[in-house]
Image: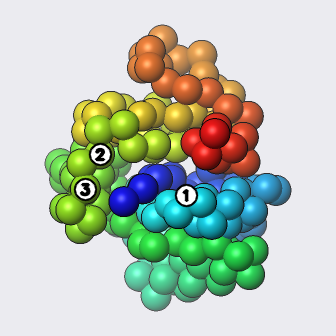
Amino acid sequence: MKLVILDRDGVINFDSDQFIKSPDEWRPIPGSLDAIARLTQWGYRVVVATNQSGIGRGLFDMDTLNSIHDKMSRAVSLAGGRIDAVFFCPHPADSPCDCRKPRPGMLREIAARYNAELKGVPAIGDSLRDLQAAVAVGAQPILVLTGKGEKTRNHPDLPPETLVFPDLAAAAAHIAA
């Protein structure tokens, strides 16, 4: 089985320092929906792994998060693609949970759900914590320069094995090559 793991905010959709708190605030980055469609058509299972501390902070509830993800899934479907599953951590940043990236719990949950080894699996994100979670499970960290990516690119702790692409479309093209 071919698997690819995507962060959500800053990779698929525009990010916001005030959080994406409603379906109306969710707006796809140009090219991201087509990139997911291409990955789907190339036989990849596309899974989203996203920290959503807005729930733990009381900024939005589970119904709202589900509505945001429904909008995202419908948009991807209209582009000809599919998101197989969305995994998320609802805990605030100071939580001792194992699921909040950069901790690897959410990615380990994906591995268990799909009975998959994550060694070498593309894990695409725009923040250092996305890349650190990927490295922790042996996945291939891929940085996109959308969202927080430009800032992350120059971080001194950037994992040396990280591949860097301008956006999700360019990363998807590399994965399929």
| Furthest-right residue in this view | 30
Seen in the picture, residue 144 relative to 88 is either above or below; the reply is: above
Asked which secondary structure carries label 1, the reply is loop
Place of residue 116 in the rendered image (x, y in percent of width and height, measured from the top left): 25, 56
Instruction: Say which residue appears at 42% left-offset and 56% top-offset.
Output: 2
Type of the residue with mark 1: Arg
Q: Which of marks 2 and 1 is in front?
A: 2
Mark-to-mark CA distance, 3 and 1: 21 Å
* Residue 155 visible: yes
Q: In which quarter of the image is residue 67?
A: bottom right
Other residues around mark 3 within 10 Å, as few (<14) / some (14–19) / many (≥20): some
Looking at the picture, tell me which residue is in the foreground, 143 or 118: 118
For residue 118, the mark is 2
Quadrant of the image occupied by residue 31: bottom right
User: Disc 2 and disc 3: Cα gap in Å?
Assistant: 6 Å
Mark number for residue 8?
1
Closer to the N terminus: mark 2 or mark 1?
1
Q: What is the x, y in percent for residue 16?
A: 66, 54
SS for dot 3: loop
Q: State the residue in front, 167 or 128.
A: 167
